[in-house]
Amino acid sequence: GEPLPLASALALAPARAPARPAAGSRWREIEVDLAHGTVTRPPGVKIDSGGLAKGLFADALAETLSDHAGFAVNCAGDIRIGGAAGLLRPVNVESPFDGRILHTFQRRRGGIATSGIGRRSWRDEQGRPAHHLLDPSTGRPAFTGIVQVTALAPSALMAEIHAKAAILSGPQGAAAQLPDGGVIVLEDGSHRVIEPPRVVTLSELSGYARQGRAAAFEDA
């Protein structure tokens, strides 16, 4: 359809609401036989890997490159970084409105994916605003109040999943879909940073154990 600037798409969009599951949930009828390597789907049930394939490819390439000191794989926006040297890398998150840097994460390894409606909006045949993120309950583009989510995860595949789920969940539910951290950008240009959970090192665990033993000794 006719390309549509983000501001125009938001101005023409229907009332905002979180996406909901499809009533039929026919994906449950798909059968996977790992032993024989087959997937069986009933007539009328379509499988579209969408962005999942990008994340999966990035992860597969990362396995191939794991012996290198450092690597970064970018499969159409789904990113996987890592390497034997454990290099610390900045991960910049841009605003979909003006391109400024909203936040920078420091990461040694893992996956990063950004999903949003900022670069791919258009008018459909009826002149309605449309984009590629659909509400499963309606089959129509989902306007939830969020325009972009960047997700961190152990793998690019999981980052892709978390980013999509966060956008579709809307502002109230998005943070729960980002267990490894990320950035949520709302329609008014504001953003929310979800920091990754802190990693506790073995030396810190040993310190906690020593403190616990000392406290028990003093109490005795």
Image (cartoon, rainbow, N blue to C red):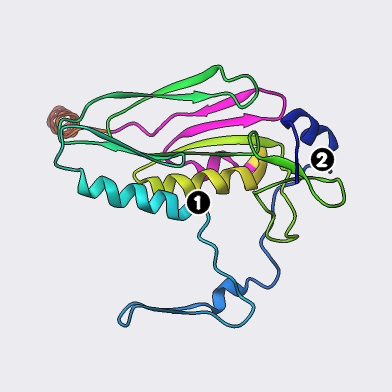
Disc 1, SS: helix
Residue 78 percent location from the top left of the image: 43, 42
Which amino acid, by three-letter code, is at mark 2?
A: Ala
Vertical placement of residue 27 versus 217, above or below: below
Q: Range of the magenta residues?
A: 173-199
Furthest residue to the top?
100
Residue 57 in picture, x, y percent from top left: 36, 52
For this orientation, the residue located farthest to the front is: 2
Q: Position of residue 134 (x, y in %)?
A: 68, 53
Which type of secondary structure does the marked residue at label 2 adopt? Answer: loop
Of marks 2 and 1, the one in the foreground: 1
4 lies left or right of 98: right
Q: Position of residue 45 (x, y in %)?
A: 61, 75
Marks 2 and 1 close (CB-CB < 8 Å): no
**Total labels drawn:** 2
Residue pointed to by mark 2: 13
Q: Nearer the viewer, residue 181 or 188?
A: 188
| Image quadrant where one finds the C terminus | top left
Crowd rating for badge 2 (residues with CA inside 10 Å; few <14, some 14–19, many 20+): some
Instruction: Tell which circle, 2 or 1, labels the residue nearer the N-terminal end.
Output: 2
Q: Is residue 159 left or right of residue 167?
A: left
Q: Could one spot residue 110 in this view of the protein?
A: no
| On screen, residue 29 above or below 7 | below
Indicate yes or no whether the magenta region holds residue 9.
Answer: no
- Check the image and name the residue furthest to the right: 126
Q: With 217 as the anchor, is 194 left or right in this view?
A: right
User: Is residue 43 visible in the rendered structure shown here?
Assistant: yes
Residue receiving disc 1:
51
Q: Quadrant of residue 72?
A: top left
Q: Is 143 drawn above or below residue 182 in the view shown?
A: below
